[in-house]
Image (cartoon, rainbow, N blue to C red):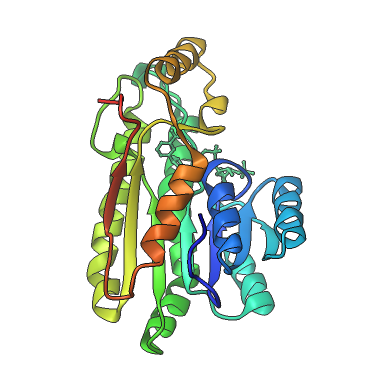
Amino acid sequence: MTYELGNRTAVVTGAASGMGAATAELLAASGVRVALLARRADRIAGLAEKIVADGGQAIAVATDVTDSAAVTSAADAVRRAYGRVDLVVNAAGVMLPNPIAAGREDEWQRMIDTNVTGALRVIRAFAGDLIDTAADGRTADLVNISSIGAHVTFPDYAVYGATKAALTHLSAGLRTEFGPRDVRVTNIEPGLTDTELGHHIDNPTLSRQLGGMFEALGGLSAAEIADLVAYAVSRPRHVNLRQLVVLPTRQA
Ligand code: NDP
């Protein structure tokens, strides 16, 4: 299903795979000009080619959201190509669980720098675009992909959960800045979703455990999350679906 979103311009981070890729595809199929951001240049270039071949508009801008200068120059590249951005989807994220006693400061830093500060860098880069768009009477959206892990605790996922709780709280805080200026902030908290997110877990026990959860509970598809994003941003501009929690039915 597509939505009525013609003449909008989106930036989607984490567009190399999973929810970001699915969201970019659905937005493009709904008429949105889409800028795809992620580190794997080949993956986003391939997706941009596919979108264009399907009749949509997309550009790939290889970007590491942990690099402030790279985010700033990506924003410049997007504006050069498409002008002002009115829809930002922060889907870039990493999930690297381990017992806290393992002391994996490298993983803690990577999660904080990607899931929290990375999202902030992207928000800073496009905040002016969103505010100016809304001031012109047009729809402007910031969508953050947080997680059910922001509220529900899992053993060995403390730092990941903390980054997602931070992102959820950031969405709420930003709403107080952006809402009065007619910029919507939508925070989405998915449960288990079948993507590449778990592929980077380097703890075999936790990797097996996650596989077992998918077997027992089933997972949502990335396309189902994309559908939620597109639905939320296609509402009339005074309607803000601000906090969306979506889980597989069997997940408690
Ligand atoms: P994926 O691993 O498929 O997607 C994550 C994306 O983030 C990839 O495209 C990756 O591309 C990108 N990314 C990672 N690090 C960086 C970086 N430093 N700079 C730029 N891009 C980066 O997983 P999902 O689609 O599941 O993840 C999307 C979001 O959903 C994440 O924030 C995740 O925490 C959240 N989430 C996922 C759930 C699930 O069960 N899958 C449940 C709840 C929330 P590249 O490696 O090329 O940079």
List the single residue furthest toward the bottom: 136
Lateral position of residue 156 relative to residue 113, left or right: left
Q: Is residue 32 above or below residue 92?
A: below
Q: Extreme front residue here?
A: 1
Name above or below for residue 233 compared with residue 17. Answer: below
Nearer to us in this view, 234 or 82: 234
Q: Position of residue 55 (x, y in %)?
A: 72, 64
Q: Can you see residue 14?
A: no
* Image point (40%, 68%), residue name: 141
Across and down, in percent, residue 220 comes to: 43, 34
Residue at point 43% right, 13% down?
212
Residue at 44%, 15% (x, y): give it.
215
Tell me where residue 236 sits by quadrant: bottom left
Left or right: residue 43 versus residue 103 is: right
Residue 238: give x, y in percent of width and height.
27, 75
Res 123 quadrant in image: bottom left
Left or right: 241, with 96 as reference point: left
Quadrant in which the C terminus is drawn: top left
Count of numbered badges drawn on the protein: 0
Residue 206 in view here: yes
Q: Image height check: is 100 above or below 246?
A: above
Query: Residue at 76% across / 47% down in the picture?
Result: 42
Q: Position of residue 182 (x, y in %)?
A: 30, 78
* Residue toward you, 144 or 98: 144
